[in-house]
Amino acid sequence: MKRLISAIGLSCLCAMTSLWAQPKPAYLDDTKPIEQRVSDALSRMTLEEKVAMIHAQSKFSSPGVPRLGIPEVWMTDGPHGIRPEVLWDEWSQAGWTNDSCTAFPALTCLAATWNKEMSLAYGTAIGEEARYRKKSVLLGPGVNIYRTPLNGRNFEYMGEDPFLSAQMVVPYIKGVQSNGVAACVKHYALNNQETERGSINVLVDERALREIYLPAFKAAVQEGDAWAIMGAYNQFRGEHCCHNNYLLNKILREEWGFDGVVISDWGGVHDTKQAIFNGLDMEFGSWTDGLNWSSTNSYDRYYLAKPYLDMIKSGEVGTTELNQKVSNILRLIFRTEMNRNRPFGAFTSEAHSKAALEIAQEGIVLLKNDNHVLPIDLKNAKKIAVIGENAIKMMTVGGGSSSLKSKYEISPLQGLKQRLQPNVEVIYARGYVGDVGDSYNNVSTGQNLKDDRTPDELMQEAVNIAREADYVLFFGGLNKSKNQDAEGDDRKNMNLPYNQDALIAKLAAVNSNMVFINISGNAVSMPWINEVPAVVQGWYLGSETGHAMAAILVGDVNPSGKLPFSFPVKLSDNSAHSAGEYPGKNGVVKYNEGLFVGYRWLDKQKIKPLFSFGHGLSYTTFEYGKLTLNQKSMSKKGTITCAIRIKNTGSRAGSEVVQLYLTDKKSSLPRPVKELKGFRKVNLKPGESTTVEFVIDNALLQFYDDTLNKWTSEPGKFEALIGASSTDIKAKETFVLQ
């Protein structure tokens, strides 16, 4: 029988009521230190109760201990919104009418804000929604590095740079956890492709592991104090990441001091003994249809269920590891479900819609704007042609586990009509037909996108209205269908699907005021780039998509987003497709490019990107002054402060992201030409100026020496570079590390 509410939860309530009528045990006393409460609760549990806690009882929950009043743990997918409720043992939705959430922009958009305040606002709002829905753990955020533009899941992550990802993930975690909901940072580690994701064995050198692929996870643990980590599906050096001794025991626990819960990705566990000894705490998704074992509950057959219990009872293994796992889970419960001081949360509030709108607006990136095509000249524009399926297609449904049932979603066409009409005529043409599917896991968009016209008919209609319009706004790019921006599969190439390139070229030929708005979480190739004067990176913007996009295009809001990853001209310009392997051979993928990911590779090879990491234009202009250092040398225990004056020299208010890169002029081991080590977003009125300062300490100068197995810096010359992007360097100064 399919259950929606657990009877165990009700029995927990009864048990707690009974317990509170007696002298309060230490584990129920929230004035006691958490470690004392953990120890006390653990001492009262039976062996069977302990084993039950470390594996799932349904798709998204694990049992508590009803006898002791210890509640269940309930999880929900994120990281862009709270997933709709599903049936007890199925992915299909449960049919609730009150679980339609606020859809926040995808994390690529959040990273593109380069604004830690936006990250905190995002985490706080989504944490409130998770808390309101009575969730213990939010399965997000994701911080895997953008290694290849073909990775179908890049839209859920924060780009190619470890420093940017690390800086942006910490406030998100703090915001979520301020609501008494654990942030579960994923996917630890090296989940950089969806092709063969459940089995591929990643081989990467220690320096690249430490300098590129782990910093965001390390910051999540040591600075964000994340309460949960999710293991990745793939293998690393021959062991699956959900029970990988080196990643989980040696690095996560011993080196970083993580005291939270390690949760498997759904179906990511493969062996009982490895799961026991190699750092996993909670197992989910191994078998979840309830049918594989007929007369026996399938959850009892999880690797960390009856097989583990039998091994303990037979004396094959002890209980030390079990007690540690249960202690970690109890600590999670005391921080979340049994924290009586946590707030009640909020759901689909006006404040959440406002946060979603502001994040979307700040993350939209103006990539190109020749002849000042944008913002739209509302004084002279009488007719605007909106073309493309992505102007009307709902993007909150689909893409994998981050698919949502949004309370509402304003399409770009809706947003533009609301903003422009009746003063400006907005006409629409489909232009192309892509994916006409309208549902994912039984969540439907309610849209009927079927169109029986031929591609030629659709193209001709678009060209005709483009010829007559004052502006052409083409909404294209990708969507969340298979082999595009979607979990489970990678893209086949960097090209735009559905013959969009041919259509864009024809539109540009008949209207010089054309804007291409790329809806995607990945870089795409643009063979027509010289013919199209304006290009906007539009991401997946969530509930407030149309309002955010209209505000940017008409100039109500000045664009200030910057790219969190590079746009290569062609796929072979990307290091994974040039120096490294992708998608691997015979079940193994070798990251032969090492440290040289994204702009690091482009710098090394002197390859000009289509659009640089950190690039983003504005409707105003900024002037950078001279870079000054408070001193020209520093000791390893000292610091140097660098300062630069920024002035808004344009006619409207705007924000600029000032970026600090550092260069080691001479190193015993190869190092990138430059690396991002600081950024600050400043908002300036016309004519206003401000001084931006960065403090450089020894930690920012270090690299991981794999011959010594430690972080180190070497005395000598360094260069501080200030830029508006990784290729637009405005000022530089040299200093010496003594």
Image (cartoon, rainbow, N blue to C red):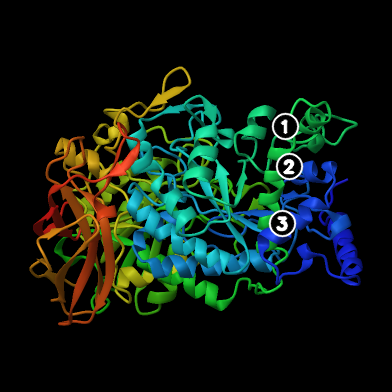
Pick whichever, 435 or 726, lies toward us.
726
Pick whichever, 90 or 663, lies toward us.
663
The residue that label 3 is drawn on is 38
Horizontal side, residue 123 vs residue 471: left or right: right
Gap between marks 2 and 3, in whole Å? 19 Å
Q: Is 660 located above or below residue 506 in the figure?
A: below
Q: Secondary structure at mark 1?
A: loop
Horizontal side, residue 498 vs residue 33: left or right: left
Measuring from the top left, give residue 505's x and y in whole percent. 25, 46
Instruction: Please say if the residues under marks 1 and 3 sit with CB atoms less than 8 Å apart.
Output: no
The residue at 21%/70% (across/down) is: 693
The residue that label 2 is drawn on is 55
Instruction: Please say if the residues under marks 2 and 1 sit with CB atoms less than 8 Å apart.
Output: yes
Instruction: Please say if the residues under marks 2 and 3 sit with CB atoms less than 8 Å apart.
Output: no
Q: Secondary structure at mark 3?
A: helix
Callout 2, which amino acid? Answer: His
Question: Crowdedness of circle 2 by 10 Å Cα count: few (<14), some, many (20+)?
Answer: many
The residue that label 1 is drawn on is 303
Question: Crowdedness of circle 3 by 10 Å Cα count: few (<14), some, many (20+)?
Answer: many
Q: Is 262 located above or below residue 294 in the figure?
A: below
Callout 3, which amino acid? Answer: Val
The residue at 36%/33% (across/down) is: 206
